[in-house]
């Protein structure tokens, strides 16, 4: 079992404390920024900016705190697949739900089936 | 097994399961398995986020009204509290990785737990309790308000289900951290084997990420500027 070698040294990548602190400060800044921006009228862009900041914060946590920057390709594929499935769920659900319309009932139908009108 | 291992020069480090070639391989397998679980969690919370997106699009005005009933100061404070707890969790793992004393590791774990408990305390005492008093909890304590459009009730349902599920994950996280403190105190970890710390850390950071999205989506939606 000598191929195991003497398991000395660190297992896994040791992230410098400075990197953790930098990520921490960036996350705190992002929190302050997203809160502050909510008090400025950007119209529709408020939501876009808030979500963009949240995505950046998520990436910082995933890459550094969760060590994905130093992880294996297999782990990364699993993570990317997870977000891809999430994207499918959100996109297709929205594509279905947000494009549904109550059909306008043709005029003649009000005599044949008046209850359909009341459904609207 | 331990008797035999003790007499061979190639004895495995504590925590090294025999089915793995190297302890590094064991570590990668554990991380991969935890991420597979976290992907199911992403999709679990994702279902809620999806329905939130759809109902927000259908009832935008009500969602903005409901959002304005929440306290931004506590939402923002709790975001900061969770980010601090993520830092201390990362430091606990790093301490184990670099072979620091168990006092250091336990110290970081306890601070993480304290921050997690602070999050839950702020949420319960200053948010949910206030909502209960004001009658903003559908089905439990709901006082109809003339100022509210009917969709506000829908928003509050989303708010309590999403933050409630998140809080439940926090409680589970505190339980996991308790076990980690006991394991650390019993000298179960070393710079060679700290896997339970690492994969529990992944869980803790994941719960933090969920809140990173919940905070802007629930508290800041539609803006907080005058006239929003």
Image: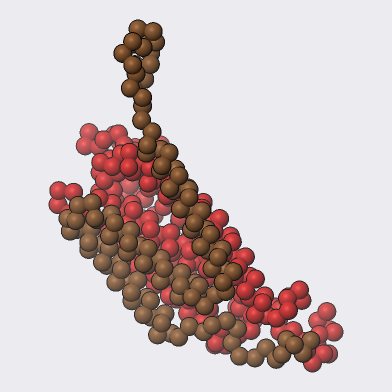
Chain A shade: brown
Find residue B24 and report its horizontal and vertical position in percent: 65, 80
Query: Is residue B200 shown to the viewer in this render?
Result: no
Residue at 37%, 37% (x, y): give it. Answer: A99
Residue at 54%, 75% (x, y): give it. Answer: A71
Is B192 drawn above or below residue A34 in the view shown? below
Q: Please tell me which residue lies in front, B140 or B213.
A: B213
Find residue B213 and report its horizontal and vertical position in percent: 38, 58
Query: Is residue A111 shown to the viewer in this render?
Result: yes
Q: Residue furthest left?
A: B226
Image check: B67 left or right of A6?
Answer: left
Q: Please tell me which residue lies in front, A107 or B106.
A: A107
Give the colour scheme shown. Answer: by chain
Is B32 drawn above or below residue A97 in the view shown? below
**Which chain is painted in red?**
B
Find residue B38 and report its horizontal and vertical position in percent: 54, 60
Is B92 drawn above or below residue A9 in the view shown? above
Residue at 32%, 61% (x, y): give it. Answer: A52
Q: How many marks?
A: 0
Is B181 drawn above or below residue B158 in the view shown? below
Q: Quadrant of residue B119?
A: bottom left
Q: Please tell me which residue lies in front, B129 or B56.
A: B56
Find residue B167 and report its horizontal and vertical position in percent: 45, 56
Instruction: Tell me the quarter of the image containing the N terminus of chain A.
Output: bottom right
Residue at 59%, 61% (x, y): give it. Answer: B36
Instruction: Tell me the quarter of the image containing the C terminus of chain A.
Output: top left
């Amino acid at each position: 079992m000598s191929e195991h070698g003497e398991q000395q040294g660190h297992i896994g990548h040791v992230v410098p404390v400075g990197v953790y602190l930098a990520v921490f400060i960036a996350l705190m800044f992002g929190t302050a920024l997203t809160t502050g921006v909510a008090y400025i009228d950007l119209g529709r862009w408020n939501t876009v900016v808030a979500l963009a900041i949240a995505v950046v914060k998520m990436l910082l946590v995933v890459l550094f705190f969760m060590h994905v920057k130093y992880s294996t390709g297999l782990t990364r594929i699993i993570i990317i697949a997870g977000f891809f499935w999430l994207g499918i769920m959100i996109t297709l659900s929205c594509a279905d739900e947000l494009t549904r319309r109550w059909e306008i009932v043709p005029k003649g139908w009000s005599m044949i089936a008046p209850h359909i009108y009341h459904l609207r | 097994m331990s008797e035999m291992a003790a007499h061979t020069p190639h004895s495995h480090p504590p925590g090294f399961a025999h089915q793995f070639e190297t302890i590094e391989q064991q570590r990668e397998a554990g991380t991969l398995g935890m991420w597979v679980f976290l992907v199911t969690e992403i999709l679990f919370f994702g279902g809620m986020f999806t329905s939130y997106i759809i109902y927000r699009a259908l009832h935008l005005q009500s969602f903005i009204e409901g959002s304005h009933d929440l306290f931004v100061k506590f939402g923002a404070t709790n975001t900061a509290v969770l980010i601090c707890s993520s830092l201390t969790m990362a430091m606990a793992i790093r301490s184990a990785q670099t072979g620091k004393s168990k006092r250091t590791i336990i110290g970081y774990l306890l601070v993480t737990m304290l921050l997690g408990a602070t999050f839950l305390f702020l949420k319960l005492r200053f948010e949910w309790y206030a909502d209960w008093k004001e009658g903003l909890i559908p089905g439990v304590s709901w006082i109809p308000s003339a100022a509210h459009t009917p969709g506000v009730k829908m928003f509050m349902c989303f708010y309590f289900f999403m933050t409630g599920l998140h809080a439940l994950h926090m409680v589970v996280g505190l339980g996991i951290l308790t076990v980690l403190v006991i394991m650390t105190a019993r000298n179960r970890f070393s710079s060679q084997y700290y896997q339970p710390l690492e994969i529990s850390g992944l869980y803790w950071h994941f719960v933090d990420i969920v809140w990173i999205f919940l905070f802007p989506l629930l508290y800041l939606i539609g803006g907080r500027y005058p006239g929003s």
